[in-house]
């Protein structure tokens, strides 16, 4: 599913170059689950940007879905991105849309028939426990409800790869635990899942292999 060989990522040019990642080599099999750990500034978000195909490596080789991302034509990247779900810490729901329409957005962008959109979104909102809140806009939802809507939007297209960047950062322990159960259920259904977190207690309650970064380097794959 994912393979990195000596991957590096730099931002800027000339005297303002920042080396965000360097020499990363690891692989994650299809259907795998990995924690992504490390202090602030370790490179977790930069790595997720690469895996989301929002950036290309500036060194080494990155393969996702068996595609060499450095050599894949730009025109082909949007189709690959549709197979990837992303859950952000700050939710990134569109304020003017209802929960239903936020979740429906990826399906509509992909050109799915409206009948299929309605059936899939209704089922997904039921799955995350938001059936009765489908007409509510983000400002009318609690933090936990917004996060569940963000998860529903990320997985409604049944992604093969699901990435989550500090998804429990704005949630209390009860909401964080519910979120983890949703992510683990997606993994059980076949999705490859990577979760970046600072929440050591959550990691302890849900043991799994972990990738640990420090200053842009992989220091442990355990």
Image: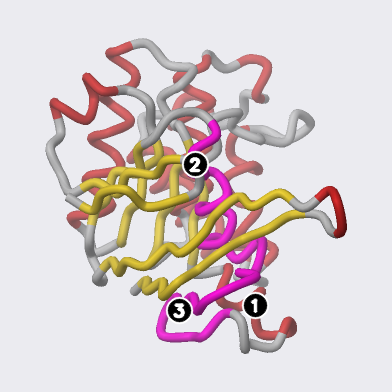
Vertical comparison of 100 with 77: above or below: above
Q: Residue 146: horizontal and vertical position, in percent?
A: 54, 25
On the image, which quarter does residue 114 sit in?
A: bottom right
**Mark 2 vs mark 1: which is more N-terminal?**
1
Nearer-the-camera pick, 77 or 149: 77
Vertical comparison of 152 with 69: above or below: above
46 within the magenta span: yes
Q: Residue 97: horizontal and vertical position, in percent?
A: 73, 35
Q: How many marks?
A: 3
Nearer-the-camera pick, 139 or 196: 196
Q: Say which element carries label 2.
A: loop
Nearer-the-camera pick, 216 or 201: 216
Q: Which residues are magenta?
A: 41-69
Q: Say which element carries label 3.
A: strand
Image side of residue 58 versus residue 120, left or right: right
**Mark 1 vs mark 3: which is more N-terminal?**
3
Image side of residue 104 versus residue 18, left or right: left
Image side of residue 135 versus residue 184, left or right: right
- Residue at 35% from the left image edge and 38% from the top image edge: 37
Residue at label 1?
Answer: 77
- Residue at 73% from the left image edge and 81% from the top image edge: 74
Residue at label 3?
Answer: 63
Comparing labels 3 and 2, the label whose residue is closer to the camera: 2
* Other-residue count near label 2 (Cα within 10 Å), few / some / many at <14 / 14–19 / ≥20: some
Vertical comparison of 70 with 18: above or below: below
Q: Say which element carries label 1.
A: helix
Q: Residue 60: horizontal and vertical position, in percent?
A: 52, 76
Residue at label 2?
Answer: 215
**Could you say which disc has been placed on residue 160 in the image?**
none
Q: CA distance from mark 1 to mark 3?
A: 12 Å
């Amino acid at each position: 599913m994912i393979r990195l060989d000596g991957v590096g990522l730099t931002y800027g040019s000339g005297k303002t170059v920042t080396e965000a990642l360097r020499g990363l080599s690891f692989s994650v099999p299809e259907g795998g689950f990995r924690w992504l750990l490390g202090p602030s500034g370790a490179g977790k978000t930069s790595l997720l940007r690469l895996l989301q195909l929002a950036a290309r490596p500036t060194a080494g080789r990155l393969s996702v879905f068996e595609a060499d991302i450095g050599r894949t034509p730009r025109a082909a990247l949007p189709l690959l991105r549709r197979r990837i779900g992303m859950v952000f810490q700050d939710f990134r729901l569109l304020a003017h849309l209802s929960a239903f329409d936020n979740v429906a957005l990826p399906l509509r962008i992909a050109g799915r028939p409206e009948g299929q959109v309605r059936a899939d979104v209704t089922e997904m909102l039921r799955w995350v426990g938001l059936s009765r809140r489908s007409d509510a806009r983000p400002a009318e939802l609690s933090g936990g409800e917004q996060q569940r809507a963000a998860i529903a939007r990320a997985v409604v297209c049944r992604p093969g790869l699901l990435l989550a960047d500090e998804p429990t950062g704005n949630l209390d322990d009860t909401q964080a635990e519910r979120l983890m159960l949703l992510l683990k259920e997606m993994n059980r259904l076949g999705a490859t899942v990577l979760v970046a977190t600072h929440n050591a207690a959550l990691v302890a309650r849900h043991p799994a292999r972990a990738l640990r970064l420090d200053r842009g380097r992989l220091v442990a794959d355990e």
